Image: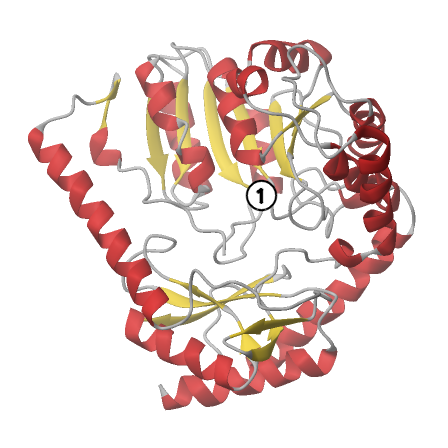
Amino acid sequence: MSVPRPKFDPGQLSSAGLTDESDGHGQALDQRLADVDRSFSAAIANGLAHLTAEDEELNGRVVTLHGRKHVNFGSCSYLGLETDLRLKDAACDAVARFGVQFSTSRAYVSAPPYRELEQLLGAIFEAPLVVAPTTTLAHLAALPVLVGKHDAVICDQLVHSSVQTVLPILAAAGATCSLVRHNRIDRLDHAVATLSRRHARVWYLADGIYSMHGDSAPMGALRALLDRHERLHLYMDDAHGVSWSGRHGRGHVLGANPIHPRMVVALSMAKSFAASGGVLVFPDQELARLVRTCGSTLIFSGPLQPPVLGAAIASARVHLSNEIHERQAKLSERIRLFNDLAGEHGLPLATTEATPIRFVKTGEAATTYRVATELMREGFYTNTALYPAVSRGHGGVRITLTVHQTLDDVRGLVEALARNLTAA
């Protein structure tokens, strides 16, 4: 489950950045931590969180939990490449040639496979890029370099926690930080116009595909804003959009388009790409060089290790073949089936967009736990989405669709959801 930490509180912001800490603020922070602890402890007590798969071998479709097999509707490996023999063989070959690890910061020396991986990724995204150890560390490397102390930053209310984690660093450096209602382009337009009068650059930070509800950023409207506001810059986290969408799996944000001159895109190789690590895609080589040279987590964090690099290279080759679009089509068939059946059964979906993340609204935590527990009893593993992943009282069952699942698996899950939502 991709679980954001508590959302960045706009009440902690001033026009100059973060407000000073006080005893009251410390108490509020302690209360938030207590709320998070209480929420997760309840999920653990219900047998729905902090689980460990009990399988001797994984096939992608089924996972064993509590001694029983369940169809896995909790994986973000949407295209099913994590069990592909080509990726496994490539990982083993990289270990045989380069060892299980290459324990040197990339500021000094990179392992040999990095060069081939970056060349292949360059062919996929057709733009300068930097590979990072994780997407979270990519944000921590890029944003403090990209955002200047005189810039303004606007975050979508639901942008992923890994992006929000960088906000205190930006605010402490002098940037003005604020939030805007989720996907409210009208409010964003107004905020950009206002902030552009006082700031040379205004950065908008958002997700391509949002990790809880599965809705998408309105890229057409955002590109129109870029055309209208010359001081606007976009920083998009498309971790959940890569591979299963776009030409060669370029993702929702880039799709079949070239990257905009005032856009930076962060991507993940740990989900559909079926390897590990993050990728930062830039509009020009100089910006990529600057982040590669000055990004703190690119200097001080460890590199991707040889087996991961080998698997990523094999995955990149699949992305550059027609096979990636065949896998995308297979996943799309499951998404359409789920949405059609959910409509027939009247399931309360957070969004009916055609993405592999489906969110069935259940409301309070007790109802969410009851539904998810009953689904497990019927042989379906799903994620519970509660505070702090979503707002209090707006919980739901989070379902991720992959090509491992059969069409009958999808039908069975929707029928089980309908039965158990009615009972709950």
- In this view, 375 is above or below 92: below
Q: Nearer the viewer, residue 84 or 291?
A: 84
Q: Residue at x 63, y 17 (%)?
A: 105
Q: Position of residue 174 (x, y in %)?
A: 33, 12
Secondary structure beneath disc 1?
loop
Residue found at the very far left of the displayed protein: 23
Answer left or right for 408 relative to 234.
Answer: right
Q: Nearer the viewer, residue 414 or 65?
A: 65
Q: Nearer the viewer, residue 365 or 282?
A: 365
Answer left or right for 164 relative to 89.
Answer: left
Answer left or right for 178 relative to 323.
Answer: left
Q: Which picture quadrant has residue 412?
A: bottom right
Q: Residue at x 44, y 76 (%)?
A: 372
Q: Position of residue 349 (x, y in %)?
A: 49, 70
Q: Position of residue 226 (x, y in %)?
A: 57, 27
Q: Which residue is mark 1?
A: 208
Q: Is residue 156 visible?
A: yes
Q: Residue at x 19, y 39 (%)?
A: 29
Q: Amino acid at mark 1?
A: Gly
Q: Which picture quadrant has residue 249?
A: top right
Q: Is residue 126 visible?
A: no
Answer left or right for 20 relative to 336.
Answer: left
Residue found at the very far right of the displayed protein: 322
Q: Split into 4 quadrants, where in the image is the C terminus?
A: bottom left
Q: Position of residue 71 (x, y in %)?
A: 63, 75
Q: Which picture quadrant has residue 192?
A: top left
Sort mark 1 into few (<14), some (14-19) or many (20+) by Cα contacts within 10 Å.
Answer: many
Q: Residue at x 73, y 52 (%)?
A: 244
- In this view, 195 is above or below 108: below
